[in-house]
Image (spheres, rainbow, N blue to C red):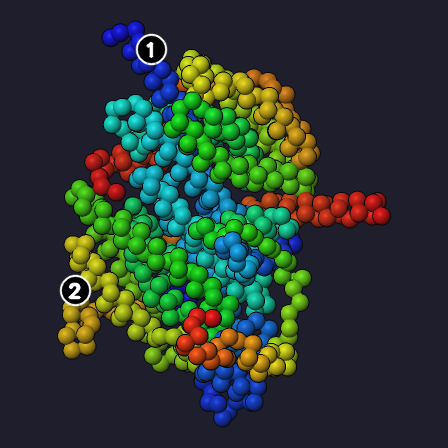
Amino acid sequence: MYAQMVKTDGARVRSLDEMDPVERAFQERIDAGQKIEPKEWMPEGYRKTLVRQISQHAHSEIVGQLPEGNWITRAPTLERKAILLAKVQDEAGHGLYLYCAAETLGVSRDEMYEQLHSGKAKYSSIFNYPTLSWADIGAVGWLVDGAAIMNQVPLQRCSYGPYARALVRICKEESFHQRQGFDILMNMVKGTPAQKALVQDALNRWWWPSLMMFGPSDDASVHSAQSMAWKIKQNSNDELRQKFVDQTVPQAEYLGLTVPDPDLKWNEEKGGYDFGEPDWSEFFAVIAGNGPCNAERLDARKKAWNDGEWFRDGLVAHAEKARSRRQASRIAAE
Amino acid sequence: MGAAQQTSTAENAALFEFLLRMGDNALILGHRVSEWCGHAPALEEDIALSNTALDLIGQTQLWLGLAGEVEGRGRSADDLAYLRDGLDFRNVLLVERPNGDFGKTLMRQFLFDAWHYLLLKALKNSSDRRVAEIAEKALKEVSYHLDRSRDLVIRLGDGTAESHRRMQAALDELWPYTGELFMGDAPDASVAADGVAPEPASLKKPWDELVAETLEEATLKTPADGYMQKGGKRGVHTEHLGFILSDLQFLQRAYPGGTW
Amino acid sequence: MSSEWPLWEVFIRGQHGLNHRHVGSLHAPDAEMAVNNARDVYTRRNEGVSIWVVRSSDITASTPSEKGPLFEPSNSKVYRHPTFFDVPEEVGHM
């Protein structure tokens, strides 16, 4: 998931009876499936939670450019290069749509960047893992985008209008991403034994981090319950993880790969796979900043921002000069 | 081999050489520009620059694809891009210059775009229909590249004192690499004689005018034409190309015969 | 921190003959660059033939609390919508 463990305010979900009339009317609109639009009244907790969730989602998109961008100059054919570049460019676009959605809630993009750069805001744990071979580019598209889609498709129906609309646009573009990843792997497993070994190695490294993307079980989480009541979260983490495993295992079999989980087996009764527990201590270590690439990722973002300051300022200065010149010539003409 | 056949072989070799130059310029500049993806100073610029790189990669496929066809030895665009060594690359030195700061990247783009635009406009009337067709498609893309790089050069030249200083420094550093764009040699003379492409020198005057006009608006000082670096067009490159190729060609070299 | 590029709303005409439709927003130092950026950001998949941009701060919007009085009157004028009228089948397509 691109937004993990988003905290809400408040200790528990309140019932309609406990709410004042304004909040109650708000909740009833959400219950009736209506969209909340910018500048309409909303509880402060709803606004703050959405800012956290949408900005974390946006940060994940732009930090997510880095592990894949890592291979643009090394893509193996001209066509693969163009496809990968278009894909990573789309991630920038997704980040942009999401930042704009968050901006409708009264926070600026620069403020959100500031929070990312200072480490105050998080982004998805998955992008702190390295892309070590070309097969990783396939695996990221297949597994990471696949996991993201699981979450983003239901979120297109979320209660906040600008977020829902951004996600509609994103989902339209995202299915291309997963397919291009799977396509890379389909080609590689048909290639030389060395290529096939790269693909298995990529699955071995990306399988568990992909399952961790959904976050730890949140069945008992008050944050999760509140977000669901607000319809800014639609499914529990475990539900989505199960759906992901059920969808992905047959695809791995199609590729002739072994999923690196000794506990994985089909459960006829529940109509889904049983599978092992991810190493949550690793997940929390990565979230805390100790993943293999946390420092590089954040440094790259900060460098891009700091090195670009003169450029952004230069353009602002020019726009101001041009405006005052236009004004002066208008006055002179009058 | 008869005399007529010999002539056509020589003409074919010149055409092949010309197409490699077109393709390699697009390939190497596209490579450089794509290095920015994820690292540009603003999201909007990141996305815009990737569009430029995508256009250039697409043009590479067309030019090198045609080059392989003309050569007639069964080499594809990918074979030409991924399996030639530096000595066989024919791009001008300008496009392999490192990105530097964003200003230098934009200045390199502008100096190249202005030339690229004028050349493609002429190539639309090429006597070789295949060349004319590629030029027509590429010209639409490159017109926009030029609009954009020209606009940004003007804005940054006439922006803050710092942006002005950086743009002037970029211009001064890159200027000695612009001369090569207009130097002709035997293959150039051959394709020009056949009406395939214009003589490189014929583009110098319109380029000078376009560039001077832009730089004036940007409040930048056009450097004098002094000593000009050259060599790329005949395979004598800067040290940078080897590193570009070691990135570009890594997978094809490390996994020969692979399926991608 | 230096000043942030202003926010622009982007409207795109998807095909000849259609209205411009709001597609999203972006940041740019001025209107000309906002148009360029809109082309690069919002028409990556051939989505448009014409682009409008307007500074977000220049948009005057109805305030949500007026939503009732502004829109409810037209809600009651159902005859404005063609589906209000029953056309007998014999009449054919109208």
- Depth order, front residue of A199/B207: B207
> Quick one: which residue is furthest to the top in this view?
B3
Q: Position of residue B35 (x, y in %)?
A: 44, 41
> What residue is drawn where x is 17% and y is 42%?
A192
Considering the image in quadrants, where does the C terminus of chain B appear? top left
Query: Crowdedness of circle 1 by 10 Å Cα count: few (<14), some, many (20+)?
Result: few
> Looking at the image, can residue A215 be seen?
yes
Kind of residue at disc 1? Thr
> Which residue is denoted by mark 1 in the rendering?
B7
> Which residue is denoted by mark 2 in the rendering?
A262
Check the residue under mark 1 and report the chain it is in: B
Kindly indicate the quadrant of the structure image that contains residue A224.
Answer: bottom left
Kind of residue at disc 2? Pro
Q: Position of residue A104 (x, y in %)?
A: 57, 67
Determine whether the residue tagged by mark 1 lies in a helix, strand or loop. helix
> What residue is drawn where x is 33% and y is 31%?
B65
> What residue is drawn where x is 16% and y is 64%?
A262
Kindly indicate the quadrant of the structure image that contains residue A205.
Answer: bottom left
Query: Crowdedness of circle 2 by 10 Å Cα count: few (<14), some, many (20+)?
Result: few
Q: Is residue A46 above or below residue A294?
A: below
Q: Position of residue B146 (x, y in %)?
A: 55, 36
Q: Contact (CB < 8 A) between labels 2 and 1? A: no
2 vs 1, front mark: 1
Determine whether the residue tagged by mark 2 lies in a helix, strand or loop. loop
Check the residue under mark 2 and report the chain it is in: A
